[in-house]
Image (cartoon, rainbow, N blue to C red):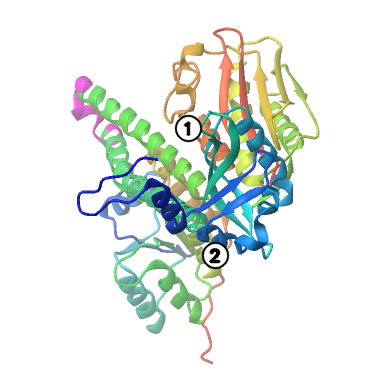
Amino acid sequence: MTTRSILLVEDNPDDEMLTLRALKKNNILNAITVAHDGAEALELVFANASGGGPLPGLILLDLKLPKVDGLEVLRRLRADERTRIVPVVVLTGSKLEEDILAGYRGGANAYVRKPVNFAEFAEAVKTLGLFWLILNEPVPEFTPQPD
Amino acid sequence: VGQLKLEDGPGFPESELLPAIVKSSDDAIVGATISGRITTWNPAAENIYGYSAAEIIGQPLTILCPDELASEIEETLAKIGRGERVVHRETMRRRKDGTTFAVSVTASPIHDGDGGLIGVSAISRDITEQQARAAAELGRRADELERANQSVESFTYSIAHDLRAPLRALGGYSSALMEDCADDLGEAGRGYVGRILAASQKMSELVDGLLVLSRVAQAGMHPEWVDLGAEVARIAAGLQRGEPERRVHFAVERPVRARADRALIRTVLENLLENAWKFTSGQEDALIEFGTVPAGEAGVCCYLRDDGIGFEPAYAGKLFQPFQQLHPASDFPGTGIGLASVKQIVERHRGRAWAEGAADEGATFFFTLDAEEIA
């Protein structure tokens, strides 16, 4: 099994550090890249995609992001043949119905609300990592053909 | 007849002054016999009602009011007959063309020189505009209030929402300290971190409670006919499944039909039932009843009664305030948000919620719902 990397798109440094710590504490040792805003996330993903590099096995995406917001990141990922099938989990503070709906409409694979309680947050991160990186069958490696 | 002396004029007889006032008044001034036949009719009356004096003199007063209000005129005449007055009564009158309008009427007896009752005078003022203005003003204030409430609610929501991230950090780093640096902290240090953790845990609950309340306040309302009894039975079955070892008898009246937003009223019933379930946990055999009591006009009054630990009646009002808990959290966990949401939701349905009970004698929670169409 190739180890799949995680792209964490998170602008809050505390949530970033705590997410990284929770993953590590739960022995999820996949490589993790962090993007701090939507533009950086898109650059990272598409630079890899263009260069034929590996795509992330999982993207954890916050919605409220500087520069390009999470929903727009999602839209662009889904609009591109190369990144259309990368699993994206929206991990955000909002529990507003319209945000949840917009997330799913935009093609998110899951929508998880960051629990305010840290123990629950750590649990959520652990569950997400275990499910998407270990339990879930990954997208088979393939080279997308140009249109 | 006396003579009025005016400083800046020659003065003129009272007998001429009074008719002049009546003639120039903006209010309809109508004289009638004690049996209600019209005897005098001023120009304003002509304007307001549309009848000329020639047409109306000799007609009964009842011609001036909508048929369904004819008894009101009889009543007024009866009062006048007893020597009483009617002052500023707001009612409806009818014009010659059949249209009706709002008036304020003052009717007084007319006496002759010997004090004998010889007739009635009625002064009526068209208050249509005044009422429209008052209604518009009321509507404007209601809108203002609604907007103010909305902004308070969305303010609450955004504050509570924005508090979540720093709070998560507080709890997160405290846990990290405890897990990674426990040895360096020493016993006192670990104690302090433990307290930070507990406090941030408590605050998390409060913040989540606030979010629940503000969502309940802002949720869209889609009223439909709901059988509350069926909802109660469903929730009760769920509670029993969760703790199959408990012996609780549910007596549920069905059907109990009410117009309500299904999702919101479910929240009400869930909160009440969970409370009843929680506070009867010490009972060997508990009884939880749901039913209705006769309600006033066009409404339904439901109750949920349990035979649990009850509460001091003096605190009945406090029960519905957010974050108030009458029983120690260590005995009965909860955030104290359940009954506050119950009240909030019931009031959004234009109903009322209250509680009755006594210590160790169970509690009964009542709420009313409109049976009429609600917005």
Q: Which mark is residue B142?
A: none
Instruction: Give the side of residue A138 with respect to residue B170, left or right.
Output: right
Residue B145, percent from left and from top: 41, 49
Q: Residues within 10 Å of mark 1 (few under 14, many from 20)?
A: many
Q: Is residue B269 magenta?
A: no
**Relative to B178, does residue A39 appear above or below in the rendering?**
below
Residue at coordinates 45% horizontally, 51% vertically from top-left?
B138
> Quick check: is B182 in the magenta stretch?
yes
Using the image, name the chain to which the residue with label 2 belongs: A
Q: Which residue is mark 2?
A: A104
* Residue B119 in sight in this render: yes
Asked which quadrant contains residue A11, the reply is bottom left
Q: Which is more foreground, mark 2 or mark 1?
A: 1
Q: Is residue A10 left or right of residue B26?
A: left
Q: Residue at x 35, y 34 (%)?
A: B203
Mark 1, residue position? B337
Which residue lies most toward the right here?
B254
Secondary structure that dominates the magenta span: helix
Question: Are labels 2 and 1 assigned to the same chain?
Answer: no
Which chain contains the residue that carries disc 1?
Answer: B
Callout 2: SS: helix
* Highlighted range, magenta: B178-188
The residue type indicated by label 1 comes to Ile
As rendered, which of B203 and A56 lies closer to the eye?
Answer: B203
* Amino acid type of the residue that numbered disc 2 sits on in the rendered structure: Tyr
- For the question of whether residue B150 can be seen, the reply is no
